[in-house]
Amino acid sequence: MDPAARGALEIEDEAVWVGEQLRAAAEGYDGRLVVVAKSLGTLAAPVAADLGCPAAWLTPLLIEPLVSEALLAYPAPQRTAIGESDPYLDRTVLAALSGRTVLVPGDHVLRVPDDPRAMLAAHTEVTLALDAWLRHR
């Protein structure tokens, strides 16, 4: 995707910043750590992998090699949810991920144009799947 369409930072710079935020949040924390990240937050996947903590990825940027490579080699339990028409969906990567994946109708924000019931159903499916997964962490 064109950097201008995403914002002012290049993807690598965004990844550094997001990763630094995760490291800072985890530093010195001795409790149970589970990462839940959406969209640009999934750029922290390499750092989350280094930390070895379970993670839930909501609408991850699967077309970005930085994210897809980290998720394909992820060393801890993971759950992934994404919309069928999300421009960041790579079906080959999604199919190869470990852990349960949830593919629902919708775009990058799980919006289903002109079908509020389908959109609500997609959000409900993702929420219930995430809730069930988190209960076992």
Image (tube, rainbow, N blue to C red):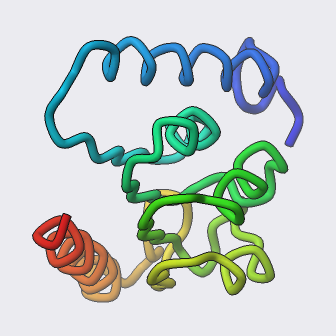
Q: Residue furthest right?
A: 2
Image height of 78 relative to 121, above or below: above
Q: Residue at x 54, y 22 (%)?
A: 18
Return the x and y of residue 103 as percentages of the image width and height. Answer: 50, 84
Return the x and y of residue 10 as percentages of the image width and height. Answer: 81, 20
Return the x and y of residue 12 as percentages of the image width and height. Answer: 79, 23
Quadrant including the N terminus? top right
Picture quadrant where residue 94 is located: bottom right
Relative to 69, 105 lies left or right = left
Image height of 86 relative to 126, above or below: above
Picture quadrant where residue 102 is located: bottom left
Image height of 2 relative to 78, above or below: above
Q: Residue at x 69, y 51 (%)?
A: 70
Along the line of sight, which residue is nearer the eye, 36 or 8?
Answer: 36
Q: Residue at x 69, y 61 (%)?
A: 73
Relative to 56, 63 lies left or right = right
Image height of 8 relative to 34, above or below: above
Tell how many labels. 0
Q: Residue at x 50, y 39 (%)?
A: 48
Quadrant including the C terminus? bottom left
Q: Residue furthest front?
A: 30
Relative to 8, 126 lies left or right = left
Return the x and y of residue 40 as percentages of the image width and height. Answer: 57, 37
Along the line of sight, which residue is nearer the eye, 86 or 24?
Answer: 24
Relative to 88, 54 lies left or right = left
